Amino acid sequence: MKEVSKDQTTGLISKGNNQTEPENDQRIKTESTSTSTSTRTKTKTVELDLSYEVEDWKILMKSSTQIFEQTIQILNITSRHQHEDPDRLISRVSKILPGSTIGKHLRHVHDYFRILLESIGSEDKILNYDNRKRNLPMETSHKVLLKEFISLRRLLVERLKDRIESRDHRDIRLFLVALTPDKLTFQTTFTRELWFVTLHSTHHFALIRSIINAETDLKIDQNFGVAPSTIIRKSIRSVAGDEVDFMNIKRLNKL
């Protein structure tokens, strides 16, 4: 009889000969077929359990809607510029980032959120970020930008509340179409893409922050355009002191 032992650090079960298998893994199963000459293992990925707790959806809603709150905040700040019309300010081409304007970056952010939300409401669940409208009025009109972001924020909240308030807390499976330049299709999910779009927006906000800080006298929040992980890292350093070894803190948290 083979000796069976459990590795307490990995949660794997040892079956002798250093072979291990995951314990209580309900997500992925494997099928093994043997022949007289060889043994082949065929791995089959089974449907993942895409259900989430209500609190998970609430956290996702909070993090993603913050992008809209920050956008509205920036638009309100630019409307108070004393020496330049808001429409001109958002459409003026940057000197430090040639070809860039505040309006173009915000329109791009809006496009990604809009495309994602449209995909979850479609029958085929196809998601294609290259299918952008390049809405020129959004790039040049402060009023249009503000209106479009407020409207899109309302739609995002509605979609997330549907998951929070209903009995169905499952994620939504999507099919991401990408040109690389060859056309490829990947399976993905709404929550994964919402996470991506949120972080992608932070990247564009960082560019907007650079334009505003270098080319205007407007004052914006110091965390605008800063990745959440960077904000957390800074807060830990400010509490523990500048000499703190952040990697050591991460190791201690695992103990």
Image (cartoon, rainbow, N blue to C red):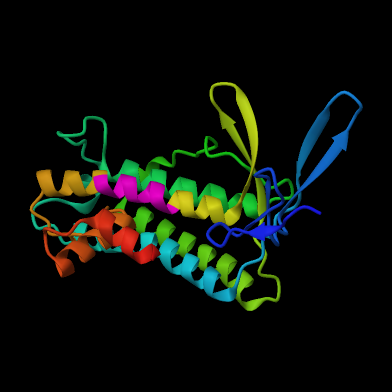
| Observer-nearest of 210 and 93 | 210
- Is 12 left or right of 62, judged from the image as shown? right
Q: Residue at 59%, 21% (x, y): give it.
A: 182
Quarter of the image with the C terminus in it: bottom left
Image coordinates for residue 12, horizontal then vertical, percent: 63, 56
Q: Is residue 95 above or below residue 231?
A: above
**238 vs 253, nearest the viewer:** 253
Name the image quarter holding residue 185.
Answer: top right
Q: Is residue 28 above or below residue 23?
A: above
Q: Nearer the viewer, residue 38 or 65?
A: 38
The residue sitting at 71% across, 57% down in the picture is 4
Q: Position of residue 236 (x, y in %)?
A: 22, 65
Quarter the N terminus occupies: bottom right
Q: Residue at x 13, y 50 (%)?
A: 84
Answer whether residue 235 is magenta in the image: no
Magenta span dominant secondary structure: helix
Q: Residue furthest right?
A: 36
Range drawn in magenta = 198-206
Tell me: 115 left or right of 5. Answer: left
Q: Residue furthest front?
A: 1
Q: Is residue 99 visible?
A: yes
What percent of the width, then of the height, locates residue 211?
A: 18, 44
Q: How many marks?
A: 0
Query: In this orientation, does residue 224 appear?
Result: no
Q: Nearer the viewer, residue 80 or 25?
A: 25
Give the left or right position of residue 54, taking residue 227 as reference: right
